[in-house]
Amino acid sequence: MSPDRKPIPFRGGGFAPSPVRGAAAATFLAVLALWWVSTRFGWISPIALPLPGEVANAIIDMVRSGELWQHLKASLVRLLVGWSLGAGVGLIIGFAIGLSSLARSTALPLVSALFPIPKIALLPLFIIWFGIGETSKYATIAFGVFSPMVIAAFGGVDAVDRGLIRMAQSFGVPTRDIIRKIVLPGAMPALLSGVRISASIGIILLVAAEMIGAQYGIGALVLAAGNLMQVDRLVAGVLFLSGFGLTVSFLIGLAEKALLKWR
Amino acid sequence: MELIAEKICHAYGNLKVLDDINLTIRSGEIVAILGPSGCGKSTLLRFLGGLERPTSGRVLMAGAPPADCLNPLTFVFQDFALAPWRTVAQNVALPLEHQPMRAEERAERVRSALARVNLSEFANAYPRQLSGGMKQRASIARALAVNPAVLLMDEPLSALDAQTRELLMDDLTRLWGETAFTAVYITHNLNEAVRLGHRVVVLSRRPGRIREIVPIDVPIADRRDGHPALAPVSAHIWSLIREEAAQADRELTDVA
């Protein structure tokens, strides 16, 4: 190479993180090892954090006695009923706001006013209305899920390509079919992200409601274990919650794959 | 069937966009409407197809559409307007689904429309997998599937590159040769207007008025670049639009 020629400096690259195979598993193992080491050698008091093995034993005990299933079932039913109620109504109201001027001018301000209320603040009111039983828990979850779902739905409807709607109108497609074949699939990405957000809000409210007054449920399990200083059962409960959230998110991921394969 | 625009005027607030448009589209002819951007030509097309209402004037249909016509006034859009969640065949089937017909007839209409634009082998592809030219062919197939009385084409080739545009023009020429269809072809491209129009309607800048209607007698199938009879026609139309185009180019656009 002659002296007046030199390679240009490279300025590109980076800003494209990609997952490294096995790194996730290694991270979990490292955290587990750190946990084991620090509790085993007494760096962390056993009152604050049990050994990983003790948590595993607590989980096995709960599985054997059937207690785990009781808690899981109670929580699952609450989440399913509350979420379906809130998300279903939210979806309908959201579509109405997205499609009709009347709904937009009446329901939207109302939803906007409801949205900033931390829904857990309504639980005492719901307990007065519906009693300490399941209904007040369903209502809290449903209410919490409702407004994010409304906002996701009407945002999704608003974002539907107007060109496609005009196309369908130009072919004389009836309004009902336009909603079903153009607006609904067009809003689907936003709806699914609404499902994702509302599901995580639902889990938060589920645990909060179960901590205020419930015999079974993962929230109740965690609270009771805390009151009795059963840290092993408490940590087990927290792990169940993590698994719970991961499962919900995995299921939504499957739904996204199936419904948005055209993207 | 004829399509007649009668004294069409349109204004957005105080801004006049179309002024006294009178035009008859005769059966079996392609009318190219040529004008600079912002002259209201796409708006005019939406009036012709009943997607919008003019401030004054009206659009009339004379005579009955063909017997098996499902949607007399059918658009072909510049941006194709294909639903991304539907395959090519499903997109073509969309305007047929609400029509009362047997499933076999629907499938047959889709099949034959795709065959006419040479897309049969891509029936199950999604729009994102298609090139721009293929997307517009799919959108043309969808329009053909309803057997329209008048095709309303809104700058159908403007979103395509120059080579694809040539290919699509050949396709349209061939399609018209197979079965003469009636079309209104909106464009800002002189070359397209002269290649495809039996008559070229030259619009002025805003407010859009008809400056001249130029008939072109050369059969569409014979038109090629450098055809001796086309050169003077092109030159004449260019002289009509040149000044307007230059002025439009030096204008701030607030109204699309």
Image (cartoon, rainbow, N blue to C red):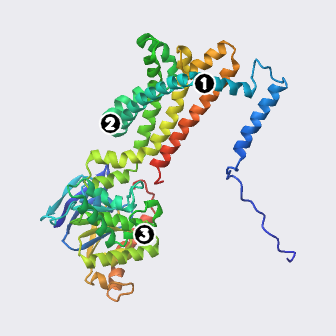
Image coordinates of residue A244 in percent, x first then y, are 57, 32
Residue pointed to by mark 2: A101
Residue A122 higher or lower than B46, as above or below: above
The image quarter in which residue A153 lies = top left
Circle 2 crowding by C-alpha within 10 Å: few under 14, some 14–19, many from 20: few
Image coordinates of residue B66 in percent, x first then y, are 16, 66
Q: Horizontal placement of A70 versus A36: left or right?
A: left
Circle 3 crowding by C-alpha within 10 Å: few under 14, some 14–19, many from 20: some
Residue pointed to by mark 3: B133
Tell me what residue is drawn at x 82 percent, y 26 percent.
A40
Q: Does the image show residue B155?
A: no
* Circle nearer the viewer, 1 or 2: 1
Judged from the image, the secondary structure of the residue bearing numbered disc 2 is helix
Q: Horizontal placement of A34 versus A115: left or right?
A: right
* Circle nearer the viewer, 2 or 3: 3
* Residue type (three-letter) at the residue carrying disc 1: Arg
Give the label on residue A64, or none: 1
Task: Indicate the chain on which mark 2 is placed.
Answer: A
Judge by depth and name the residue closer to the eye, B92 or B19.
Answer: B92
Are circles 3 and 1 on residues that touch, CB within 8 Å? no
* Residue type (three-letter) at the residue carrying disc 2: Ser
* Residue type (three-letter) at the residue carrying disc 3: Gly
Give the tally of numbered discs.
3
The residue furthest right is A3
Give the label on residue A246, or none: none
